[in-house]
Image (cartoon, rainbow, N blue to C red):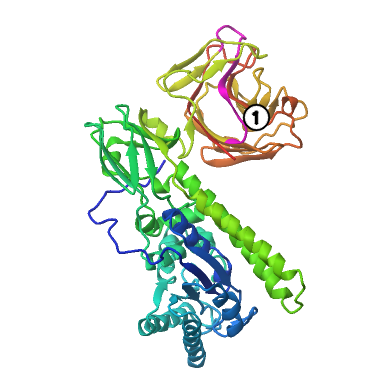
C-alpha cells in the first residue's frame, strides 16, 4: 500500500498569522459555484478543525445564476442587504464572473459592466459595514484542459482577465485576493496527463467542480488566508526513549515499548482518498504539503517494518528509514481524521438548515408575510446555532493512544484505518468452536504470521472464531488455499457457525467471493460471474469485504476488483441477530476437503462502521 512519506525541511511550517480572528463572522457570496456549498464548507471545516478554540461562524450565501447585478434572488441591492449585510459580517468573500462573461469571447462592453458592477458592490459593502474585510475571489476556471475549447472560442482567458481586474481592484481598495482559478487549472493539467477520463470528473460540466475540484479551490482560499499546514509534529528518539520535540500537541507516557499518549491541538483536514477523483486531484496538487501536515518522525529504530497504530487501528506500516525521515499521518485513515469527518458532517448539516431557512422560508414567503414566518425562521436559527455548537464541540481535541509495533513486511498491505485482529504471533483473541457441524478440528496453527487450518483427522473440520462480536464492519484478509479445499469467511457468526459466508471454495466447480447462507434458511446463494478473472491460484489473494444494515448488504473485492454487491431480502441471521463473530472455516467431510490440504490466512483486520 502506498503512503505519503516526506522529508522534514527547515521552515516547512513557518508562516505569518492566519487571516481570520476570534469573533469573525464570514459570509461567502457568489453564484452557483458558491451555491454548491462545497469549497465554502471545506474551508469552514478546515477552520473549525485546525482552530478548535477560535470562535468564527460562517454563512453561505451563493445563488445560482448570479452576476454583479444580482439574479434570481433579487437585484444586487436586495441580495447584499438581505443575504450579506443583514448578518453583520466582519469578512465577506465574493466570487462572481462565470455568468458575467456570458460564456463568449472577450467583449469590452461586458467587461465594463462587470468591473463597474463589482466596484459598486465593494463600495456598498464598505459603506454598510465599516471595517469589513472583503476578499475578492478570482473566478474559478472554465475547463479547457480536459476538453478542447468550444467553437465560439476559449472562455477561461476571459475569466482570467476578470481576475486580473480584481487583482488591481484589491490593491486599490485594500481588499484580500484569492485565486481559485490557477491552482485548479494546474491540477487539471497534471491530472489529465495521468488519467484523462478521471480528470474530466474534477470539473464534470466544465463549469461546476465536483467535490474534488472544490477541495482544491478551498485550498486556494485557505492559502490566501495564510492557513497553517501544521496539524501537529512529533519526533521521538527510540534508542534514547525520549520525545525530541512536540509541536501543537502534548506527548506523555512514552514507554520502552514505544507506546505513548498524544493530545493534539488540532485535527487534520478530512480528505476522502478512497474516492478516486479526489485521490487524483490531491495527488496532482500541493494540498497535502501546503495544508495538511501531521508528521511523525521516529529515529533510532532497528531495521525492519513497524506498524503505527492509534487506538488500536493501523494507520500504516513503514520501514525504519521511512519513520526516521518522517511520515505524514494527516493523509491516512486515523481516528483523528475520522473525528474531522464527523465535524464536516455537522458543517454540512448546519449549512443545510440555514439554506432551508433562507431559500424555503425567508425568500419565497416574504411577499406574503405570514404571521408564523418569523417564529419559524427563529426556530431554524436556533437549530442552526445548536448544530454549530455541536460542530465546535466535535472538533475539541481528544487524547489518543499511539503504539509502534514491529511487524512482518507483509502487514503493510492492511488498509489504513483497519484494526488487526490477528497479531501474527498466536491465536490470542480467537477460539475454536466445539459445537460447529463441520467439527472441532484442533489443527489451527499460527506460524510465521500465518493462520493455517486443516482437518486433524479425516472429515473433522471446524471454524476458528473471534472472541469479539461485530455488527457493521469492513474486513481485510489474505488467503492462499490448497486447491481442493473448501472454506469460507463467516460474518456475524454464531458459536455454531450460523452465518453469512463469503465463499472460499477452492475446488473444480467451486466459487470464491460469492455469498452463501451457512445454516441460514432462505438465503439465496450469489456467485460472482467473473471471479476467476481476478483469482490467482497458488498465490496470496486479498479479499476485502463489507457487511452493513439490519437487512445485510455484503460487498466483496478480490485483489482490488469489486466482484460482489449483494443485499438480502430480509435478515436471515439466526434469531434475527444483527451482530456476531468473525470466523474462518475448514470444511468438514472427506469429499469436500483435500486430505492433507491447508487453508492459509494472514493480515486479518477489521474496520468497524457506525
Q: Quadrant of the N terminus?
A: top left
Q: Quadrant of the C terminus?
A: top right
Q: Which residue is depicted at the point 70% across and 36% down?
A: 550
Q: Quadrant of residue 20?
A: bottom left
Between 194 and 181, the residue placed more toward the observer is 181
Residue 283, horizontal then vertical, whole percent: 41, 55
Q: Identify residue for label 1.
A: 579
Q: Quadrant of residue 187?
A: bottom left
Q: How many marks?
A: 1
Residue 1 falls inside the magenta stretch: no
Please say if 342 is above or below 519. Answer: below
Q: Is residue 244 left or right of residue 46?
A: left
Q: Which residue is depicted at the point 57% across and 10% down?
A: 441
Q: Which residues are magenta?
A: 455-473
Residue 564, horizontal then vertical, whole percent: 63, 39
Between 272 and 11, the residue placed more toward the observer is 11
Between 156 and 120, the residue placed more toward the observer is 120
Amino acid at each position: 500500500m502506498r503512503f505519503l512519506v516526506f522529508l522534514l525541511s527547515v521552515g516547512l511550517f513557518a508562516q505569518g498569522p492566519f487571516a481570520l480572528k476570534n469573533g469573525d463572522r464570514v459570509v461567502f457570496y457568489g453564484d452557483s459555484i458558491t451555491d454548491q456549498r462545497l469549497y465554502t464548507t471545506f474551508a469552514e471545516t478546515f477552520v473549525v478543525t485546525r482552530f478548535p478554540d477560535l470562535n468564527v461562524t460562517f454563512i453561505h450565501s451563493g445563488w445560482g445564476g448570479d452576476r454583479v447585478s444580482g439574479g434570481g434572488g433579487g437585484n444586487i441591492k436586495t441580495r447584499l442587504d438581505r443575504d450579506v449585510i443583514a448578518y453583520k459580517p466582519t469578512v465577506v468573500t465574493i466570487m462572481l464572473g462565470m455568468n458575467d462573461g456570458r460564456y463568449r469571447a472577450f467583449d469590452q462592453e461586458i467587461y465594463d459592466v462587470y468591473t463597474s458592477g463589482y466596484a459598486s458592490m465593494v463600495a456598498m459593502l464598505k459603506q454598510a459595514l465599516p471595517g469589513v474585510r472583503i476578499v475578492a475571489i478570482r473566478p474559478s476556471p472554465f475547463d479547457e484542459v480536459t476538453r478542447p475549447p468550444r467553437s465560439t472560442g476559449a472562455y477561461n482567458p476571459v475569466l482570467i482577465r476578470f481576475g486580473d481586474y480584481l487583482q488591481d481592484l484589491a490593491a486599490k481598495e485594500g481588499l484580500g485576493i484569492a485565486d481559485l482559478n490557477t491552482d485548479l487549472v494546474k491540477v487539471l493539467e497534471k491530472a489529465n496527463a495521468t488519467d484523462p477520463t478521471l480528470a474530466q470528473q474534477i470539473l464534470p460540466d466544465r463549469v461546476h467542480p465536483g467535490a474534488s475540484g472544490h477541495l482544491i479551490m478551498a485550498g486556494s482560499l485557505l492559502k490566501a488566508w495564510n492557513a497553517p499546514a501544521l496539524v501537529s509534529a512529533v519526533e521521538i528518539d527510540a534508542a534514547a526513549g525520549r520525545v525530541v520535540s512536540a509541536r501543537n500537541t502534548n506527548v506523555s507516557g512514552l514507554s520502552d515499548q514505544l507506546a505513548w499518549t498524544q493530545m493534539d491541538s488540532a485535527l487534520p483536514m478530512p480528505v476522502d482518498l478512497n474516492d478516486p477523483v479526489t485521490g487524483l486531484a490531491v495527488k496532482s496538487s500541493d494540498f497535502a504539503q501546503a495544508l495538511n501536515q501531521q508528521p511523525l518522525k521516529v529515529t533510532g529504530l532497528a531495521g525492519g517494518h513497524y506498524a503505527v497504530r492509534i487506538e488500536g487501528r493501523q494507520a500504516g506500516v513503514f520501514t525504519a528509514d521511512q519513520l526516521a525521515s518522517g511520515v505524514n499521518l494527516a493523509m491516512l485513515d486515523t481516528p483523528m481524521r475520522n473525528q474531522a469527518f464527523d465535524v464536516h458532517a455537522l458543517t454540512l448539516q448546519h449549512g443545510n438548515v440555514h439554506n432551508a431557512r433562507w431559500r424555503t422560508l425567508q425568500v419565497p414567503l416574504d411577499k406574503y408575510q405570514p404571521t408564523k414566518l418569523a417564529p419559524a425562521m427563529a426556530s431554524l436559527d436556533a437549530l442552526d446555532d445548536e448544530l454549530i455548537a455541536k460542530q465546535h464541540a466535535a472538533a475539541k481535541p481528544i487524547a489518543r493512544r499511539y503504539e509502534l509495533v514491529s511487524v512482518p513486511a507483509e502487514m503493510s498491505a492492511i488498509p489504513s484505518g483497519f484494526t488487526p485482529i490477528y497479531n501474527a504471533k498466536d491465536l490470542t483473541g480467537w477460539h475454536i468452536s466445539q459445537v460447529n457441524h463441520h467439527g472441532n478440528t484442533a489443527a489451527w496453527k499460527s506460524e510465521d504470521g500465518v493462520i493455517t487450518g486443516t482437518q486433524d483427522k479425516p472429515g473433522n473440520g471446524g471454524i476458528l472464531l473471534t472472541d469479539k462480536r461485530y455488527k457493521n464492519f469492513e474486513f481485510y484478509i489474505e488467503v492462499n488455499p490448497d486447491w481442493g479445499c473448501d472454506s469460507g469467511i463467516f460474518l456475524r457468526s454464531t458459536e455454531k457457525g450460523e452465518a453469512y459466508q463469503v465463499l472460499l471454495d477452492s475446488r473444480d466447480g467451486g466459487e470464491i467471493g460469492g455469498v452463501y447462507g451457512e445454516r441460514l434458511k432462505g438465503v439465496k446463494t450469489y456467485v460472482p460471474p467473473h471471479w476467476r478473472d481476478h483469482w490467482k491460484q497458488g498465490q496470496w489473494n486479498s479479499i476485502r469485504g463489507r457487511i452493513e444494515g439490519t437487512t445485510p448488504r455484503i460487498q466483496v473485492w478480490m485483489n482490488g476488483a469489486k466482484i460482489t454487491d449483494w443485499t438480502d431480502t430480509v435478515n436471515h441471521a439466526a434469531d434475527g441477530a444483527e451482530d456476531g463473530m468473525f470466523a474462518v472455516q475448514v470444511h468438514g467431510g472427506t469429499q469436500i476437503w483435500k486430505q492433507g490440504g491447508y487453508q492459509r490466512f494472514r493480515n486479518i483486520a477489521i474496520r468497524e462502521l457506525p
